[in-house]
Amino acid sequence: MCYWGWRFPYFYNGGFWGMPLMMLLNGIFWIIVIIAIIYAVRYFFKEKRYSNKEDLLNTLKRRLVNGETLEEFEKLKKNLDL
């Protein structure tokens, strides 16, 4: 009789599906970890998005004060629908 005897298809006392199930769960775990890292990196390195039109208008006014021409200011204001 061989070493495994009648228990050959069983892996680590988890039945036949013990090892494949653990491999699947391990793969799912690492996929979740990688997705979480991607979201964390994107969250911390995203550009600031303006929440309202007042912030955009204030930024345009600051650029006008810093030396942009009135034509550039009006063109940007028109493009942003302010």
Image (cartoon, helix red, strand yellow):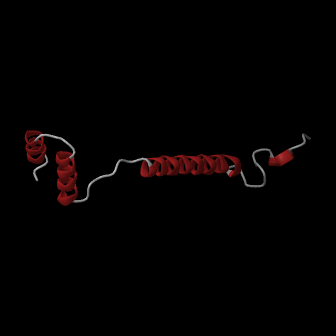
Please state the horizontal and vertical placement of residue 4, each as a whole percent of the image: 86, 44
- Residue drawn 9% across and 43% down? 70
| Residue situated in front as seen by the camera: 77 or 9 | 77
Please state the horizontal and vertical placement of residue 20, each as a whole percent of the image: 65, 46
Please state the horizontal and vertical placement of residue 56, each as a whole percent of the image: 20, 53
Against 2, is 65 above or below? below
| Residue situated in front as seen by the camera: 76 or 24 | 76
Against 74, is 55 above or below? below
| Residue situated in front as seen by the camera: 38 or 70 | 70
Is residue 27 rendered to the left or right of residue 10? left
Task: Give the quadrant of the N terminus.
Answer: top right
Is residue 54 rendered to the left or right of residue 19? left
- Residue drawn 48% across and 47% down? 41
Is residue 21 rendered to the left or right of residue 32? right
| Residue situated in front as seen by the camera: 13 or 78 | 78
- Residue drawn 90% across and 40% down? 2
